[in-house]
Image (tube, rainbow, N blue to C red):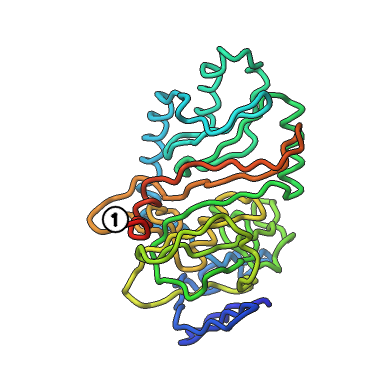
Amino acid sequence: MSVKFPLLQIPLINFFVSSTRIFRHRRFISMATQSYFDFPSAATTDYPVPLSPPLPALSKDIEPNRALTASTKSALFSLSRSHVIFEDEWLIAVNKPQGIYCESVLCSLPDLLNDTGANVSELHLANRLDRDTSGVMLITKLHKVAAKFVKAFTDHKVRKTYLAFCVGLAPKWEKITVKSGHGRSKYGAWRVYAASDAGRKLPGGSLVKDMETSFEVLSVNGLACFKEVSDLQKDGAVVVVQEKSVIGCDSKKDEILVRASPRSGRTHQIRLHCQYLGIPIRGDVRYEGVYEWKGSRYDGHELHAESLSFEHPITGKPTLLQAPPPCWAIQSLRSQFE
């Protein structure tokens, strides 16, 4: 069942409907203080209106410094065997650290493979991660294998899960799927658009594309049970985005660990949908995540590519690649194991 958010209203009660029960909660107040008329170009043209807010001023100060730091760090980066989580004659998967560019990982791989006799001229990134996203990065060793993965990703045959540490008002849902549009706004920033805007033209000439992510709550303030990777699209509420998000006005903020599974592979997809749900990722200043939290500053967002699962392109065997959880995920679940 689909749920739409009300336009330019501040309801005290919203409903998320799942297949098993109704979630009733005080949850939302306007995420973006801007109204429709804050986008004059949208009001006078036929371009779709973005439904998530523009980049915060804070990000314009912090992001350039983060990029410079990552460039320096990436130039000095060298892969070691401790980074490798899987390898055979066709594939190698590594656990990319936070704050390292994918290209730097790829460039350092030949030194690691020189002793194996691999043809390093055919190395190719099968998936890409944002600079500050850690976790599973898959690299193919042969052009023919790379082509098979391009098709597998295009056909949604590769399943991905991520862990995200969020700060916001704890959600009342346990599982939820968000369906929306995705595209660049007039000023070049990635934004959430209405699901019905998919296919419409944007100011820069690109089109709004569809975007779908399923979420599952793993922990709230350290209380909950860690769950194994499951089918997140079962037994969860579905939100079809048509209007601006509204998030809670409560001053209280919780720490929420979620698992996310993107069906599409849009730029900053999970980060955008977390922002839309009112639980932006800690450290993600681009999308309203807290920069300072409990006396600490965060130099990057806390998003981790937990797993990739697919049918091996050569052997045909089901393959699951998992990266060890980062320290922030382990710490948020520590009480479960004490």
Find residue 103 and report its horizontal and vertical position in percent: 54, 30
Residue 15 seen in render: yes
Image quarter in which the C terminus is found: bottom left
Looking at this view, name the residue that lies furthest to the front: 338
Find residue 240 and report its horizontal and vertical position in percent: 65, 71
Residue 76 or residue 245, whichever sits in front: 76
Q: Mark 1 belongs to which amino acid?
A: Glu
Looking at this view, name the residue that lies furthest to the bottom: 12
Q: Look at the numbered disc 1 and give the secondary structure of its residue.
A: strand
- Judge left or right: residue 83 versus residue 283: right
Q: Would you call the spot at circle 1 few (<14 residues within 10 Å), some (14-19), or many (20 or more)?
A: few
- Judge left or right: residue 212 versus residue 279: right
The structure residue drawn at horizontal position 62% and vertical position 31%, both measured from the top left corner, is 139
Residue 263 or residue 329, whichever sits in front: 329
Residue 197 or residue 119, whichever sits in front: 119
Image quarter in which the N terminus is found: bottom right
Count up the numbered dots.
1
Find residue 336 and report its horizontal and vertical position in percent: 37, 60
Which residue is disc 1 drawn over? 292
The structure residue drawn at horizontal position 59% and vertical position 41%, both measured from the top left corner, is 321
Residue 81 drawn above or below residue 46: above
Find residue 5 and report its horizontal and vertical position in percent: 58, 78
Query: Would you identify the image quadrant in which residue 122 lies?
Result: top right
- Judge left or right: residue 27 versus residue 91: left
The structure residue drawn at horizontal position 49% and vertical position 34%, both measured from the top left corner, is 101
Query: Would you identify the image quadrant in which residue 280 lies?
Result: bottom left
Residue 212 or residue 225, whichever sits in front: 225
Residue 186 seen in render: no
Query: Would you identify the image quadrant in which residue 186 lies?
Result: bottom right
